[in-house]
Image: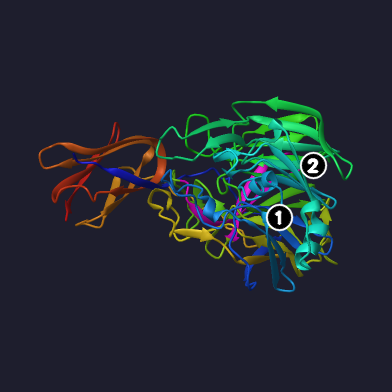
């Protein structure tokens, strides 16, 4: 039987109104500079804390790249990060110590992936995470809250001393979450989104797991006297439509009315569709607000930094690379790819004083990096972070290039779309540290180029003849939905796809390896624009 595998929808060029996407006016730019630190291992999807003297403690995560597809290979515990890592970027030093001296339940949780975490003073609080539990005999989401005394652990690792006494843990099913985000506001912790995932991940449709999104914002206090831990004053807000998201970016914000809170930016997956959310959710101490302005250039957890312009009552959030449904090409066109690829985009979302949002591309990462990475802020004489998290733009001198922090770890991919052909060689955990510099008074923001739609169908395909993958580029009149099909010389349809109303360029890649040798017709048609076809030969 002939079988056609759709590899990827490479792109859909969207024409936006000027009010939605425009040239940025805010005068600053960021630069990302790779830094080599000898001995730094690759790690992604980890938790981190920072000691009082600026050293970075890295806990958990994975030492491989994008998770594999075969059920027996996915989230292989052999690639768990089983070490505590201490990083001193300025001294170019790395120290490691195995988790093996810790109690079993702490060992298992702290080598998991996608834990939620927040550091308050010297204590790093870590919640949940997903990974293999030898105790349970399966992959689970861990039901633990663990407290780590960062300064003491860092000092013990550097000086090769015992550190088990600096870890404490309690079990609480309300903390059994992975892929969410955690923040802190007015003595309360906020555990937002995420999921309860039990069993081995299997994207091939097998019954090896159960998955339940929390669909909640969980608010609580952690009572910690230095010896015992407990959860108090717990409450939860549930919204199955708008809080059904995980693996997203949540960033602390100062809102136009002066209040502090968070924004849950985009995330995956929409209810009933394997596509990212494009909207966001503002979280306040009094509740939440759904923001129905689309964000196109960042949809998955990546390094990010919030920047507050107090003089103009404006809030910027910068996202570094990662994964997104949209990206901008070299001509400034906005391209849609429903395979949701790795991207190089450095983007900025700006909340203006009237609460409206604008989005800009402000640069590129040095490769397909940034997904599942973390930004660690660095303070200095010219760099001040409000509450240790939000960069105060107005404290930075004009036209002075300053170091604002480091991007640590993440996934380094060899190509934008690797998921469906991922055998473990297409990506890796990134060992590179990236220094992030900001220069106030300059900008390199890129506007979107607007393209008028054609009056009739335009179609190109290549290569022709073809052996493995056939690429098609399709343009239609404004507002046209259409179909794509491949027909053999017997008149039999061997591939068919219907595409809803689009504007601009639709790029498609089709795996034709399993087609028999011979001639075929590639046809595009729509109700109003008619049909267009091109013959091609399969070698």
- Quarter of the image for the C terminus: give it: bottom left
285 vs 139, nearest the viewer: 139
- At a point 79% along the width and 62% down the height, the residue shown is 156
**Magenta-colored segment: predominant secondary structure:** strand
* Quadrant placement of the N terminus: top left
For marks 2 and 1, give the one nearer the viewer: 1
Helix, strand or loop at label 2? It is: strand
- Magenta region: which residues? 340-363
Q: Secondary structure at mark 1?
A: helix
| Label 2–label 1 contact, CB within 8 A | no
Name the quadrant containing residue 426.
bottom left
Is 212 included in the stretch rendered in magenta? Answer: no
Residue 185 located left or right of residue 109: right
For the point 25% across and 58% down, which residue is it?
Answer: 463
Whichever of labels 2 and 1 marks the residue nearer the N terminus, that label is 1
Q: Position of residue 454 (x, y in %)?
A: 35, 45
User: What is the CA distance from the residue labelled 2 to the residue labelled 1?
Assistant: 30 Å
Q: Residues within 10 Å of mark 2 (few under 14, many from 20)?
A: some
Tell me residue 178's x, y (percent). 62, 40
Above or below 214: residue 368: below
Towards the viewer: 209 or 315:
209
Please give the residue where the numbered disc 1 appears in the rendered image: 101
The residue at the point 55 percent across, 65 percent down is: 366
Report the disc number at residue 184. Answer: 2
Residue 212 position in % (x across, y down): 57, 30
Q: Position of residue 201 (x, y in %)?
A: 49, 40
The verdict on residue 357 being magenta is: yes
Q: Is residue 503 visible?
A: yes
User: Can you tell which mark lies on residue 456?
Assistant: none
Whether 206 is drawn above or below 315: the answer is: above
Q: Is residue 255 visible?
A: no
């Amino acid at each position: 039987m002939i079988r056609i595998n759709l590899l990827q929808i490479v792109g859909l060029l969207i024409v936006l109104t000027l009010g939605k996407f425009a040239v940025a006016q805010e005068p600053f730019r960021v630069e990302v500079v790779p830094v080599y630190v000898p001995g730094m291992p690759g790690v992604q999807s980890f938790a981190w804390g920072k000691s009082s003297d600026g050293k970075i403690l890295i806990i958990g995560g994975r030492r491989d790249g994008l998770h594999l597809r075969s059920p027996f290979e996915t989230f292989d515990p052999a690639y768990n990060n089983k070490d505590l890592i201490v990083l001193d970027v300025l001294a170019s030093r790395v120290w490691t110590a195995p988790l093996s001296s810790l109690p079993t339940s702490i060992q298992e949780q702290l080598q998991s992936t996608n834990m939620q975490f927040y550091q308050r003073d010297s204590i790093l609080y870590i919640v949940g995470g997903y990974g293999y539990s030898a105790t349970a005999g399966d992959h689970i989401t861990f039901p633990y809250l663990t407290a780590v005394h960062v300064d003491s652990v860092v000092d013990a690792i550097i000086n090769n001393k015992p550190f088990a006494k600096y870890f404490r843990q309690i079990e609480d099913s309300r903390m059994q979450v992975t892929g969410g985000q955690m923040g802190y506001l007015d003595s309360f912790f906020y555990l937002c989104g995420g999921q309860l995932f039990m069993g081995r991940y299997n994207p091939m449709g097998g019954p090896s797991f159960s998955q339940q999104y929390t669909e909640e914002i969980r608010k609580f206090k952690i009572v910690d006297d230095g010896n015992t831990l407990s959860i108090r004053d717990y409450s939860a807000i549930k919204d199955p439509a708008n809080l059904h998201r995980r693996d997203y970016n949540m960033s602390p914000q100062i809102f136009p009315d002066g209040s502090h809170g968070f924004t849950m930016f985009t995330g995956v997956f929409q209810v009933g569709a394997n596509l990212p959310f494009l909207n966001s959710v503002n979280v306040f101490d009094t509740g939440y607000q759904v923001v129905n302005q689309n964000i196109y250039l960042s949809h998955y957890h990546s390094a990010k930094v919030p920047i507050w312009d107090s003089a103009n009552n404006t809030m910027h959030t910068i996202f570094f690379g990662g994964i997104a449904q949209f990206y901008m090409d070299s001509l400034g066109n906005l391209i849609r790819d429903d395979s949701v690829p790795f991207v190089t985009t450095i983007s900025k979302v700006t909340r203006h004083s009237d609460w409206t949002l604008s989005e800009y591309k402000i640069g590129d990462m040095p490769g397909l990096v940034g997904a599942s990475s973390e930004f660690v802020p660095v303070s200095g004489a010219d760099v001040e972070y409000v509450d240790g998290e939000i960069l105060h733009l107005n404290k930075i001198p004009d036209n002075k290039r300053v170091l604002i922090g480091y991007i640590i770890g993440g996934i380094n991919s060899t190509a934008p779309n690797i998921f469906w052909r991922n055998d473990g060689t297409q990506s890796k955990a990134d060992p590179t540290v990236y220094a992030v510099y900001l220069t106030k008074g300059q900008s390199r923001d890129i506007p979107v180029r607007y393209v008028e739609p054609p009056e009739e169908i335009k179609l190109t395909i290549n290569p022709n003849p073809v052996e493995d993958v056939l690429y098609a580029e399709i343009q239609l009149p404004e507002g046209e939905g259409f179909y794509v099909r491949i027909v053999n010389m017997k008149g039999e349809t061997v591939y068919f796809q219907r595409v809803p109303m689009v504007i601009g360029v639709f790029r498609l890649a089709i795996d034709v390896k399993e087609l028999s040798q011979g001639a075929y017709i590639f046809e595009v048609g729509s109700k109003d624009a008619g049909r267009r076809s091109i013959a091609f030969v399969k070698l």
